[in-house]
Amino acid sequence: MKSFRYEAPRTVEEAVALLAKGNGDARVLAGGTDLIVQMRTGVRHLRLIVDVKRIPETLRLEFDGTVLRLGAAVPCAAIREHRELRRIFPGFLEAAELIGSEQIQGRASVGGNVCNASPAADTVPALIALGAECVIAGPERTRSVPVEAFATGPGETVLQTGELLVELRIPAPPTGSGDAYLRFTPRTEMDIAVVGAGVCVTLDGEGRCTAARVALGAVAPTAIRVPAAEEALVGTDLGTEALELAAEEARAAARPIDDLRAPAWYRRHLAGVLTRRSLAIARDRAMRRA
Amino acid sequence: MARKSHVSTIVNGEPIEFLCDPPQTLLEVLREELQLTGTKEGCGTGDCGACTITLDGRLACACLVLAVEAEGRSIGTVEGIASGEHLHPLQKKFLEEAALQCGVCTPGLLVAAKALLDRNPQPTEQEVRYALAGNLCRCTGYDKVVRAVLDAAVEIGGESP
C-alpha cells in the first residue's frame, strides 16, 4: 500500500474536522474489509485514513424496544451476539449474517456496507424494508437521510466532504409485522448477491396487510424500493395471488445489467422469485407476531 | 519519511510493543517484525482465511487489519494455542488424523476452530462446516479437518466434564 496518514480520533467532532481538512483524499476506516482491499489492490489511493473505532457513538449498539441505534462501526458479529435483535429484526439479521466469513463478520460493519454503496450490498434492501435512517454528522450540522436515499450510484453516496455516517436508526416494526431478506448466489456462502430482496409487512387482527415495504438489491445502480409492489400488497391477505402481483411489479421495476454474475434477464426473473419468497417468509413471521 | 507509530498490544497474552508505518498490515508486522510466522499470507484480500487471528476475541483476517489499529488491542495467533510443549487437542487431532497436507491453511483453521469450540463446545458437523467456511484449503478437501475438529470437541468435553 502507498503511504498515508492514519488518525484515530476520539470524538465525532474531531473526525469531522479531519475529514473536512482531508478534502476528498480522506476516507473513513471501520472494519476495513472493503477499504483495505481497495487500497491493497491499488483501486483507491488516499492521503488520510480516519479510523472511527475509538469514537463511542460509532460503536453504540442500543435497542430500547422502539428503535435500534446501530453505530456505523459496529461489526456484524456484535449484532449477531445481541440477545434481542434476532426476534425483532430477523430479516435484517439474515442480511447482516450473510456477509462474508466469520473472519469478515468480526470486522465488517453495516455502516461500512452502506457507505461502500455497492448495488449488491446485502444489508441495504433489509434496512430499506425497515425504514432505517442514516444519521450523518458534518462540519455545519447533523442530518438524517433515509437509507434508500443514501446511495446515489455504485460507490457514490450523499456524503459531502467532512461528513461522517455516525449511526443507523432502525425502527422496530409494529406488532403484527415480519421482515425477511433473501438473496441468490451461485454458491451457498461467501458470495456476492446476484439479486437480493428485503421486505417487511404488517398484518392487522384479521390478517389483512396494512403496510408493506419491498426493496431490491443488485438490479439497479443502487438498491431500489418498489412502491408498486407495496401497493399491490396493502389491503390483501398476502395470499398467493397478491404475492404474485408483487413479484410482477418487482420484475417490472428491476433495471438490471448483464455482468459476470448473471445476465439481465435472469436477474429480472430472480427479482420476482425472491420478492415472492421473501414476502411469504415475512408474512408467516408477521402471523406469529400478531 | 513519516515518523513511525508506536503501538502497544497484547499478543497471545504477552505485552508487546512495536513500531510501524500506517500502510503496514498487522499480518506484515506479526510475520516480519515480531517473527510470528505461524500466521500465513494467502490471498491478501480477506477471502482465504490463512491469516486468521483473533482481535479482542473476535476472528479477523490479519491481512485486512492495519498494524496501527492494534493499539491497545489483544491479538491471538496460532502460536498462542499450545501451552508450552503441550499441544492443544485441536492440534493433536489435526496431526493424528492427517487433517493437513501443505499446511498453509492450518494455522488459520486452528485459530478459527478454536474460536468455534470456545463459543460452542459441542458443534454439529454443519456448524463446523459453516464456522470454517472462511478458511480455504486446496489440498485436503475439508473432510479430515471437520472430523478432527469434531473429535477435538469430544476430547475437550471428556477432559472437563
Image: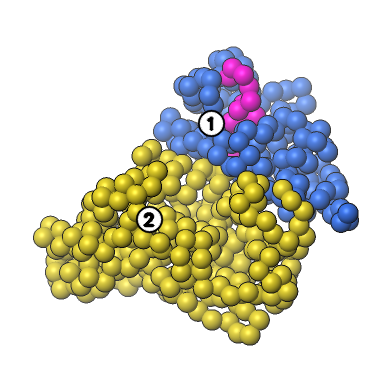
Chain colours: A yellow, B blue
Determine whether the residue tagged by mark 2 lies in a helix, strand or loop.
loop
B120 or B58: which is nearer to us?
B58
* Identity, as a three-letter code, of the amino acid under mark 1: Leu
Q: Nearer the viewer, mark 1 or mark 2?
A: 2
Residue A147 rendering spot, x and y as whole percentages: 44, 70
Query: Residue sitting at 65 percent across and 36 percent down?
Result: B51
Q: Main secondary structure of the magenta part?
A: helix
Same chain for mark 1 and mark 2? The answer is no
Residue A42 rendering spot, x and y as whole percentages: 64, 49
Q: What crowding class fits label 2: few (fewer than 14 Cα within 10 Å), some (14-19), or many (20 or more)?
A: many
Marks 1/2: CA–CA distance: 27 Å
Residue A148 rendering spot, x and y as whole percentages: 41, 70
A64 or A221: which is nearer to us?
A221
Residue identifier under label 2: A218
Q: What crowding class fits label 1: few (fewer than 14 Cα within 10 Å), some (14-19), or many (20 or more)?
A: some
- Left or right: residue A158 compared with residue A57: left
Residue identifier under label 1: B136
* Identity, as a three-letter code, of the amino acid under mark 2: Ala
Q: Callout 2: residue from which chain?
A: A
